[in-house]
Image (cartoon, helix red, strand yellow):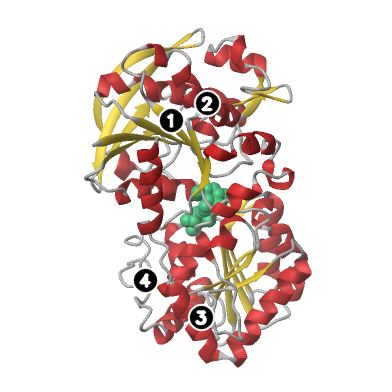
């Protein structure tokens, strides 16, 4: 039996800010239990929902050195859906209304968390063969491991994997402060290790020191070797190309299942969806105060409202989109200019636009179930889960061909009668709008074709079945 430890900054159902949490919370459940004992370690954030905080059992605590500081490390645990989760407690680091977001605090918070995640292992008597780290917040884990921990027999044989969910976020801060915080020697702060253009870079540390690297789709694995997508680390990605794999994310098909989902108005399946989706649409229109028009082309957006997600293209085309027989339903938070842009259009065109500028699991499920199409014109997209949720719920994705979007949505081909969505290649607002108009025309004029496409999407398999096997292969290879 191989032992695997996931170290991450978020995981469902405990804490979520984006797709990372979906992956960390679901992948462990889908790895073969006869082969792997997978456990997860997360921070115990004060902003975690009370219902989950209550479930955690205190195991122990101790003090750990971090640079010149000595810090309290509390350890809690719970078993959720068969998976063992550990939580690191420290009220100084993990207080606040959101898990993270201020980089000057976050760099110390995650240096602490990364070192603590390693330090607790003998205490909880779990000796993993592989430590699987996710994103910059855990970039220092492979570094600490190779630094002092490896000298200790308990850690000597542990391998590490670093998964890039988003190369844009790297955990960058000035070198002197990071030396001071981490207590790592000057040796580590050179351009072949943690330094990037004069600053300390956590993700780079992980990418240099981990034994294997992965990212969340094959296309993104290729893209990040180029300057456009490489975020100044494309050279390193090329240098480590042999150790880098792209494994597309899966969805937790138990949680995301239109047949059983209790958050939607009406359940349905790939075999029977037309009237049921119409019912979901009518109910959502009612709930959001949109006119209950059956034929309006309802386009959903559930997203962080940032440049990554192509919001500037939408901004550019919004006025024109509001002249069409569309209803645009947005759920998201992010950059203020985009939040206000959607608020503005909802005010100007209350019959066309519903702007829901907040976070809600509940509404997100209802949007995936109710809409006709889902718009995701990302500038870059490591994998993307929203388009997978849309496919699963029979909501046709309209995407830009990049990263995981390109790998998971097959473009509609009216001559061959194949495809699960609509796509465009260039990051261009008019190209996006043309694609939306094309989708709309198929929706209006070729209903049978449209419904077949919906069905193909619902039948496509984006569960963890295939991808969990690829992680298993990687673990075995290591
Ligand atoms: P990213 O992780 O880059 O934000 P993904 O597509 O991988 O993008 O995952 C986004 C996840 O977050 C999806 O599960 C999506 O439904 C969810 N999500 C995004 N914004 C909201 C919101 N405002 N309310 C509820 N869920 C949201
Ligand atoms: C990141 C990426 C997203 C991916 C998610 C989970 O947030 O932006 O594309 O789906 O991580 O891997």
Which numbered disc, 4 or 3, marks the residue closer to the eye? 3
- Going from N to C along the chain, the mark reached first, 1 or 2, is 1
Q: Identify whether 180 is placed above or below 383.
A: above
Horizontally, is 269 left or right of 126 in the view?
A: right
Horizontally, is 450 left or right of 275 in the view?
A: right
- Contact check, label 1 and label 2, Cβ < 8 Å: yes
Horizontally, is 115 left or right of 78 in the view?
A: right
Question: Residue 393: x, y in percent?
Answer: 44, 71
**Residue 277 sits in which quadrant?**
bottom left
- Going from N to C along the chain, the mark reached first, 4 or 3, is 4
Is residue 384 among what the camera can see? yes
User: How far apart are the two marked residues, 1 and 2, measured between alpha carbons?
Assistant: 8 Å
- Say few, some or many: other residues with alpha carbon within 10 Å of mark 1 (under 14 / 14 to 19 / 20 or more): many
**Mark 3 residue CB less than 8 A from any atom of ligand 1:** no
- Say few, some or many: other residues with alpha carbon within 10 Å of mark 4 (under 14 / 14 to 19 / 20 or more): many
For label 4, the residue is 258
For label 3, the residue is 453
- Going from N to C along the chain, the mark reached first, 2 or 4, is 2
For label 1, the residue is 160
**Mark 2 residue CB less than 8 A from any atom of ligand 2:** no
Question: Residue 116: x, y in percent?
Answer: 40, 22
- Say few, some or many: other residues with alpha carbon within 10 Å of mark 2 (under 14 / 14 to 19 / 20 or more): many
Which numbered disc, 1 or 4, marks the residue closer to the eye? 1
User: How far apart are the two marked residues, 2 and 3, measured between alpha carbons?
Assistant: 44 Å
């Amino acid at each position: 039996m191989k032992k695997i430890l996931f170290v991450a900054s978020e995981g469902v159902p405990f804490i979520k800010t984006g797709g990372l949490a979906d992956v960390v919370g679901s992948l462990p459940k889908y790895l073969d239990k006869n082969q792997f004992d997978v456990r997860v370690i997360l921070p115990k954030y004060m902003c975690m929902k009370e219902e989950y905080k209550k479930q955690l059992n205190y195991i122990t605590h101790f003090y750990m050195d971090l640079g010149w500081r000595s810090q309290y490390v509390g350890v809690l645990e719970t078993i959720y859906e068969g998976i063992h989760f550990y939580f690191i407690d420290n009220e100084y680091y993990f207080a606040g209304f959101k898990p993270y977001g201020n980089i000057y605090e976050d760099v110390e918070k995650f240096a602490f968390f990364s070192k603590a995640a390693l330090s607790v292992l003998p205490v909880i008597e779990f000796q993993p063969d592989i430590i699987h780290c996710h994103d910059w917040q855990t970039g220092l884990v492979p570094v600490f491991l190779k630094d002092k921990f490896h000298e200790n027999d308990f850690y000597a044989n542990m391998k590490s994997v670093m998964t890039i969910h988003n190369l844009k976020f790297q955990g960058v801060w000035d070198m002197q402060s990071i030396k001071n915080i981490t207590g790592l020697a000057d040796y580590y702060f050179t351009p072949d290790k943690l330094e990037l253009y004069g600053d300390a870079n956590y993700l780079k540390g992980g990418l240099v020191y981990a034994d294997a690297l992965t990212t969340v789709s094959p296309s993104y694995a290729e893209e990040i070797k180029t300057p456009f997508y490489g975020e100044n680390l494309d050279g390193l990605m090329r240098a480590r190309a042999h150790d880098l794999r792209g494994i597309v994310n899966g969805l937790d098909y138990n949680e995301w299942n239109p047949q059983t989902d209790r958050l939607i108005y009406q359940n349905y399946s790939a075999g029977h969806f037309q009237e049921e989706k119409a019912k979901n649409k009518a109910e959502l229109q009612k709930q959001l105060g949109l006119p209950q028009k059956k034929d309006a082309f309802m386009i959903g957006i559930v997203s962080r409202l940032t440049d990554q997600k192509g919001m500037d293209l939408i901004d550019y085309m919004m006025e024109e989109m509001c002249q069409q027989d569309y209803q645009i339903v947005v759920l998201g938070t992010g950059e203020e200019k985009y939040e206000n842009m959607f608020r503005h259009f909802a005010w100007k065109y209350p019959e066309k636009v519903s702007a829901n500028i907040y976070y809600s699991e509940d509404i997100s499920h209802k949007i995936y179930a109710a809409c006709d199409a889902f718009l995701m014109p990302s500038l870059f997209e490591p994998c993307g889960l929203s388009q997978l949720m849309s496919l699963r719920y029979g909501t046709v994705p309209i995407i830009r061909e990049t990263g995981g979007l390109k790998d998971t949505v097959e473009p509609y081909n009216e001559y061959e009668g194949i495809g699960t969505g609509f796509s465009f290649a260039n990051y261009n607002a008019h190209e996006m709008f043309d694609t939306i108009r094309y989708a709309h025309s198929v929706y209006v004029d070729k209903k049978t074709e449209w419904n077949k496409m919906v069905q193909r999407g619902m039948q496509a398999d984006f569960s963890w079945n295939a991808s969990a096997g690829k992680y298993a292969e990687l673990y075995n290879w290591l």
